[in-house]
Image (cartoon, rainbow, N blue to C red):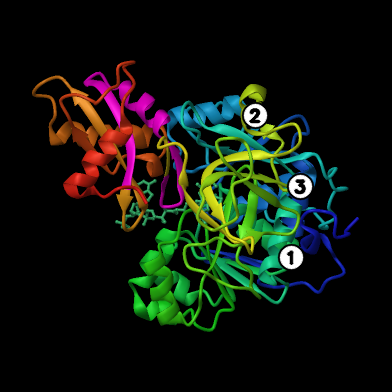
Amino acid sequence: MTDATTFLAAFRDTRRPDRPDAVRVGDRTASWSELRRAAAALARDLPDDGPVAVCAEPTLDTVVAVVGCLVAGVPVVPVPPDAGSAEIAHVVADSAATCWVGPPRDGVELPVLALPDGEAGSDGSLPTPAEDDAPAIILYTSGTTGAPKGVVMSHRALRTGIEGLADAWDWTDADVVAHGLPLFHTHGLVLGILGSLHVGSRVVHTGRPTPAAYAAAGGTMYFGVPTVWTRIARDPDAARALAPARLLVSGSAALPVPVFERLRELTGHALVERYGMTETMITLSTRADGERRPGWVGVPVTGARTRVRGEDGQDVPADGETVGRLEVSGPMLFDGYLNLPEVTAEVLAPDGWFSTGDLATKDAHGFHRIVGRESVDLIKSGGYRIGAGEIETSLLAVPEVLEVAVLGLPDEDLGQRIVAYTVVAPGHGTDELAARLVDHVADDLAWHKRPREVRFVETLPRNAMGKVQKKSLLDTAAGAGGGAPA
Ligand code: MLC
Ligand code: AMP
């Protein structure tokens, strides 16, 4: 079956002419037929009794592994290649993964499944597609507290999410998608790679998302997080090289208005900004054929619905100013957090409305602006979602650390940078300890979750109940030139 209601429809459709350079990752390229044969060969070898963990390095092998799982109907768990010991142990245990694809890792006891040598013995015939509602992928993402949660996305959620974007962006098989984002999150993996295989566009993964690599990628559609766009805006030659593209798209965090304006000057493009979450795919976007308004993330994509609710549980006026809690619904939403039905029930109502935790406003034309997050404990740094709680837990395991409060302070490059306010015994607050704390988080959780700064303080501000007053720390940081969060 290769009809359009199957995820990865274009890639599955053997009637389409082959594309010799369908997927490029770094310096390796695969045609659709090569990828089909490699994925089919892997699918044949996969266990059918549980999720498969894939070490999601930015390589063509990762693409083969993920696509092999999807066509086999076996849920895939992309694991950040920089994941530290505690994080990797959690993801492997929580997902109940039955095998591991990728370079062996210390502490991972699972059987390692090697990718088949070449496309050995495979004619590229893909297995019968999984049911639309079957789980396709489990993406681990941070909450305000605790270890990352497994977000279960069905084939239907991925397919309808991509179809909404194809409509919003006029995304077709004539496009070449270019990006250099990680292959363990929605943005880089699901949209960039799998989205291209569904729509039929070529995709070029640039390795690291440097301005020079974007300039050389020859894309018609570029995907980037705001940090990537900020760096391109500071490199006028690289930015000008993007002028021939059709669409430049920003998402995963707020795009600063000055960056939008600077890129308009340099590239002639008003960036498309879109809003999404791991749990929801992309639900809001400005459109290829519509208004692009700096600081605003546009209108619901096809299939998605939104509402902005006030304290009283009612819709706030659609006046473009009144702020409320953003809720979304649609077929692109997740099924729930793995093993966490109660946590799921707190955010996903039985009628399908999901509480995003973001604060937003909507205008009379249905345009949305994201104003911020309800909780200061969810940090967005370089487009990565990081929970303050998981970093605090990790740091408290270091014997010298008596108390700690982690905050996201405004940062021109990363949007927010992770700062750990740390109380240690007198005399222990040295540069050596600060460096050791940063390394500890990188080794325990992930390189991209490491604090960028450790500030030693004598005490943390607490209220009468003993709860740390993070807003007060933010205000003090702003007064000291650290800036208030946007
Ligand atoms: C990188 N470095 C490492 C390392 N990784 N060193 C040791 N160990 C590791 N594991 C080094 C690099 O070589 C480099 O050194 C330096 O660290 C900085 O590297 P960088 O790649 O520039 O990283 P950094 O500045 O930290 O990150 C910026 C960034 C990154 C934008 C590249 O934050 C990023 O990839 N963000 C994307 C996050 C994302 O995809 N979010 C989507 C979530 S899904 P040197 O010496 O070479 O400079 C979602 C849904 C939606 O949100 O709406 O899309
Ligand atoms: P993640 O689960 O990593 O996708 O993170 C989702 C969060 O990223 C959302 O809840 C928002 O806080 C933030 N986000 C994503 N896109 C945007 C955007 N265009 N503008 C502002 N915030 C965004």
Kindly report the distance in space between the C-alpha atoms of the residues bearing marks 3 and 2.
Answer: 16 Å
Q: Is residue 90 above or below residue 298?
A: above
- Label 2 element class: helix
Mark whose residue sits in front, 2 or 1: 2
Residue interval drawn in magenta: 380-409
Residue tagged 3? 331
- The disc at residue 230 is none
- Which residue is rendered at x = 51% and y = 45% of the image? 359
For this view, does 176 lie left or right of residue 398?
Answer: right
Tell me which numbered mark, 2 or 1, is placed earlier along the sequence. 1
Residue drawn at the location 55% of the way across and 36% of the way down: 311
Instruction: State the mark number for residue 199.
Output: 1
Q: Residues within 10 Å of mark 3 (few under 14, many from 20)?
A: many
Residue with the mark numbered 2: 344
- Kindly identify the residue that appears in the image at 37 percent across and 31 percent down: 391
Check if residue 383 falls in the magenta segment.
Answer: yes
